[in-house]
Image (tube, rainbow, N blue to C red):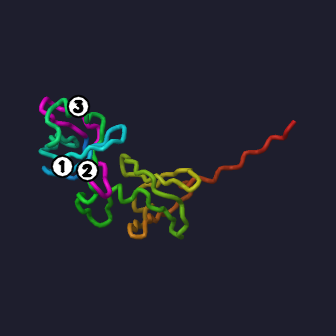
Amino acid sequence: MGGDLVQVGVRVRPHGVRGEVRFLSLSGVPGRFAQGLQVAWRGPDGADLPLTIESAREQGDEVFARFTQIPDRTAAETLAGGTLWASAATSPPLEDGTYYHHQLLGLSVIDEDGAELGRLSAILPGAAHDNYEVEMPDGRRFLVPAVEAFVLRVDLDAGQVVIRTAPGLIPDPPKPRPRRKAR
């Protein structure tokens, strides 16, 4: 499986005795796990195993799936603790102004005046909205609420997220520590 991969499932574990596995879907797209979808199972050690969905049923955020390469529970047990990844190209198109996480991660974050603030390093879910974590060049991090009041524009072609800053949003540079006099 080539190209960019996006994580579509976590907490993989066996289910039943016929080789079915159960996992938490990160997709949010009904019908995402259709028969024939090629995925990669990635183990805790980083090893990948290509799999093809034979059948799947969704119950809320959980998916119960069978893979053509996994004939029984013993084989399904080897997948426990892994994650599932799919080609980004298999992701359905979104409405204008909405983005997949993999499209945003790593983008440059600039303010309204064009000053570089850092890179979008993580997207953290919140109760009311997501928060974008920005890592500054010096390693400090800050959070930006992912709402229109702060996120003014996302330009995938330019690789930028333009944000509106506010007092207290961006951490102040560290203050130099006073030097002690040698005795």
Q: Is residue 173 above or below residue 82?
A: below
In the image: residue 35, left or right of residue 114 = left
Measured from the top left, where is residue 154 in percent x and y?
40, 65
Q: Which residue is mark 2?
A: 27
Tell me which residue sits at (28%, 57%) in the image: 88
Q: Which residue is mark 3?
A: 77
Measured from the top left, where is residue 158 in percent x and y?
43, 70
Residues at marks 3 and 1, CA–CA distance in whole angstroms: 20 Å
Tell me which residue sits at (26%, 43%) in the image: 49
Measured from the top left, where is residue 42 in percent x and y?
31, 42
Tell me which residue sits at (48%, 52%) in the image: 143
Magenta stretch in the rendered image: 1-23
Residues at marks 1 and 2, CA–CA distance in whole angstroms: 9 Å
Q: Nearer the viewer, mark 2 or mark 3?
A: 3
Q: Give the camera-side residue of 143 and 45.
A: 45
Measured from the top left, where is residue 25 in percent x and y?
25, 45
In the image: residue 3, left or right of residue 139 = left
The amino acid type, in three-letter code, at marker 2 is Ser
Magenta span includes 19: yes
Figure quadrant of the C terminus = top right
First along the sequence among labels 2 and 3: 2
In the image: residue 126, left or right of residue 143 = left
The amino acid type, in three-letter code, at marker 3 is Glu
Residues at marks 2 and 3, CA–CA distance in whole angstroms: 23 Å
Q: Is residue 48 above or below residue 29?
A: above
First along the sequence among labels 3 and 1: 1
Q: Nearer the viewer, mark 1 or mark 2?
A: 1
Are circles 1 and 2 on residues that touch, CB within 8 Å?
yes
Corner quadrant of residue 148? bottom left
Q: Which residue is mark 1?
A: 33
